[in-house]
Each structure stands twice: as structure tokens, then as C-alpha cells.
Image (tube, rainbow, N blue to C red):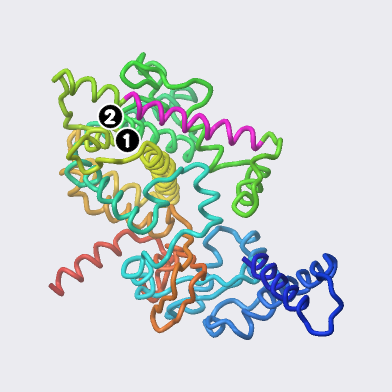
Amino acid sequence: MDVILCAGLTAVESLVANNLPGRPTGPVSGQVALALFLAQYLAVKYYRIFLYHKYFSPLRHIPGPTNNHFLFGQAINFLKAETPTTLYVKWMREHPDAPFIRYLTWGNTEVLVPVNLNAHREVLQFQCYSLQKPTWFLRIVKEVAGHGLILMEGEEHKAHRKMLGGSFSLKNIRKLEPIFQEKAKDICRYFNQCIRENDNKTGFIDCTTTFSKAILDIMGQAILGVNLDYVKPDEDKAEDSAQTNGKALKKGCSFHEAYDVFFSPKAMGKVLLFANGFIPTRWLPLQANREFLFAMDWLNDVLRNLIRDRYREVSAATAAGKYESKDSRDLVTFVVEESMPGGVAEGIGENEFLGHLLEFMAAGHDTSANMLSWSLYVMALNPDIQDELRAELSTLSSNPTYNELDRLPYLEAFSKEVLRIYSPSTTYHRETNTDIVVEGVHIPKGTLVDLCPSVTLLNPAIWGDDVDEFDPQRWNRWHNKNTQKK
């Protein structure tokens, strides 16, 4: 934008200079025009980087950190921080009641972080469509997530949310109960296998890897209708593992390996992933790029072929009068059925369909795997919590139903507390697409906004002075307190 602005100014100035009275005839030389352009461009950049945020920005009075690098703001401190949320939580503790915190990042660009509940409510609910994903974020995430519901904006987002809403209703989720039960048993059998392969007393697992594979197993069936069997013990694996209706998936990679390239890249992979949000880097002939592009091509090919195969199967069976809708439908089948004339997903395009699958598979399995890994970590550090969970679970039947699990208050409280202390998601990035006012703060169009769940989940103004303590009972106390008020 600044380049276009300065080029336009240079053109206007050259035109005016050419028509000045008394000036020798002939156009302004290229050297003079270039000098004008560079002088103006550097002046604009100096203003934006060094002057605007200090003296002219309407956000300059919002509290925030002051230990900024003269050029990179807090960017270097983020790289040095213990976790991605460390600085957000630190700033929130310094200003727990403020509506926003302002910090500076690369080139002293201003970023706002909502702090109190009212600011979050405005940004996430009442004015959510006044903010959009910033361009750099889309460039990074679209490489693995395509163009689906999570990255859509405005009316398109509303339309596709309505299309997919039915598949995530409680009624449809409960239809997947047999899948959850089967995969839970697979995980237990896998743990037993690890114990047998060690000393028949104890076993070792990599929590994040194991649970990532386990969640992909669940999502393979619940979303794609595919048996992946990543954690099923070898002796129990069926012949149709990694197949859908008898058709094997494309060889050369797996869902776990492909997503591992994106979520757990090596050092060079991390640099390329971040840099690609600002300048194209995927053309560089580097091994990290080759691995990434191969994995993403594999994901796109497998999911696109799966969509086309399912359309052909449903269409052929429907035409022959032999198609029957299953009670336990996977997401692909649900969307294919609902895309028929009269369905809620009628008119959905293949690229949008593909984008939804890419996003749900990527975002869903990583966050769930992290939550389960932190749960085991908490239980390992707190044997008393582990004992209380075991005591409550011992009251269940050997094959518990959803209704039985729904009546376990301590398990529910424990799960909520894990999500509170160890939020699976670190930050959401947004940018205002119009001028808005939140909590009396005028936020100009184009302002970056970072939403960090831990800012509310670890805020002592909300949870009290024991906010950092892992205490599942706080949820039961909160429930009882609110029940008494009613």
C-alpha cells in the first residue's frame, strides 16, 4: 500500500513539475522521479515505524509493555518466552481489569489483546464479523487447511456454518458413540501391548504422538468414514485398515505423518512456515519445502478422491433405489447426502468441501491430543486426583454409555480444569475490517487483534487468587453457588 501511495505521489509531482511556468521543456528525468519516490517512501516508513505509535495513534494510551525493541517491539521477547502464552498472561496480570492491552510487534506494528470479559464478548460475539483473519495468517494456515469454514468470512461463513451445523448437533454426535467406545478400547489394548513389550509391568509411550494417532483414528471414522487403525495393536488390525469401502488410501504417507510436518516442523521448516506468511518461500529448493509440499499434496489428493468416490457411491445407489442413510453417518457422507437437491448443503463446491475436511482433521486432532496429553501429565503429578477419578470410574458398567459418562461430575470438572490451565489453543489472530468501538476504545480499521484464551482462563479477576492451582473442585463449587442463586 505504501509503495502504491508513494508511486502515485511521485507521478502527480512529476506531472506538476512538468507544467511549472518558466521550467525548461522536457519531462522530469527518471533519476529525479526515482529520488522523489525513495525520499517519500522512506519518510512514510519512518513515520509508520518510529512516530505513529508514539505520537499519533489513537491506541497509544492503552496500557501495555514498555520494554520494546526499537524496531521489533515485543517480537524478540515472544521468541524467547517459555511458552506462546507467557507474555500475554504476564501483561494480563499487570492490567487484569483493562479492556485491552496494546503491544508492538515487527516494525512497531500495534496489536491489541482483549483482557476483560466484556471486551471478549464484543470481539467474539457481538462484533465478530467486524474482524477477519489477517492476510499473513491466511497465507500460513491455508497451506494446510484450504478454504473451509474456519477461514471463511462474512456471509460465506454464515452460509457454510448453517450447512454444517446439523452434523455437530448433540443428536448426531451421540450417533458416533460406538466409534468412541471402539477406539477407547483400542487405546487401552495399545497400552497393554506397550507394557507387554517392556517388562510386563510398566510401559512407555510418547503421549502427544500416541494421542494424536488415536484422535486421528476416531476422526478417520467419524469424519471420513475411513479405518486408519494407527493405535490398534498389530494383532487386532483388520485387513481393511487405512481403507474406505475396501479401497486403500494413496500410499507414500499417512495423515499422522502429513500433519506432523505442519504441527511439528524442524527448525528450517518453522522458519519457512512463518516467512511464507509475508513473502513466498515454497519455491525455494530446500528439503523442508519438498517434505511439506509432498505431505500437503498427499492430503489434498486423498481427501479430494474420497469426496469424489463418496459422491459416486451415493449417487449410484440412489439412482438404483438401493441407498439407505445410516444412523451413524460420518461427516463426508452427511455432507454428500445434504448436498443433494433440497438438502441444507445443496450447492456446496468441491473446494469448499475439501477445505472443511482439511480444517476439521487438522484443528480437531491436534487440540484433542494436547488435551489428553496434559490430562496424563496432571494425573502423574497428582496421585490423589488420579485416585478420585479411578474411584468415580469404577462405578461404571464394563461398556459405559454416553448417559453414564455424562453423570460423572468429577470427570467433567477434571476435564474442564485441564482445558482451563492448559488451553489447547494458544492464540487466534484477527484484524478489524472497519472502525469499531469496544468498551469505549475506538479501534481503527486494519488494527491487529490477538485473542489468547489463557488471558481469561488464568485471570485472577475472574477465577480468584488460586487461579494457578489445579483444582477440579472449583467447578463443582461454582455450579453449586450458581444453583443456590437460582
Crowd tier of the residue under label 2, counting other residues whose Cα lies within 10 Å: few below 14, some 14–19, many 20 or above: few
The residue under the point 44% across, 66% down is 468
Q: Look at the image and tell me in which quarter the C terminus lies.
A: bottom left
For label 2, the residue is: 182
Which amino acid does the dot numbered 1 rest on?
A: Ile
Q: Nearer the viewer, residue 460 or 203?
A: 460
Which amino acid does the dot numbered 2 rest on?
A: Glu
State whether residue 101 is above or below residue 293: below
Q: CA distance from mark 1 to mark 2?
A: 15 Å
Crowd tier of the residue under label 1, counting other residues whose Cα lies within 10 Å: few below 14, some 14–19, many 20 or above: some
Q: Look at the image and tell me in which quarter the N terminus lies.
A: bottom right
The segment highlighted magenta reads 288-309
Q: Is residue 290 located in the magenta-colored stretch of the structure?
A: yes
Residue 221 placed where, x, y %? 31, 30
Indicate the quadrant where residue 312 lies.
Answer: top left
| Res. 187 visible in picture | yes
Q: Which mark is residue 480?
A: none
State whether residue 66 is above or below residue 403: below
Q: Which mark is residue 223?
A: 1
Q: Nearer the viewer, residue 230 or 28?
A: 28
Residue 175 placed where, x, y %? 19, 36
Q: Secondary structure at mark 1?
A: helix
Q: Magenta residues: mostly which secondary structure?
A: helix
In the rendered structure, which disc, 1 or 2, sits on the residue that comes first in sequence? 2
The residue under the point 61% across, 51% down is 274
| Res. 396 visible in picture | no
Residue 11 placed where, x, y %? 71, 70
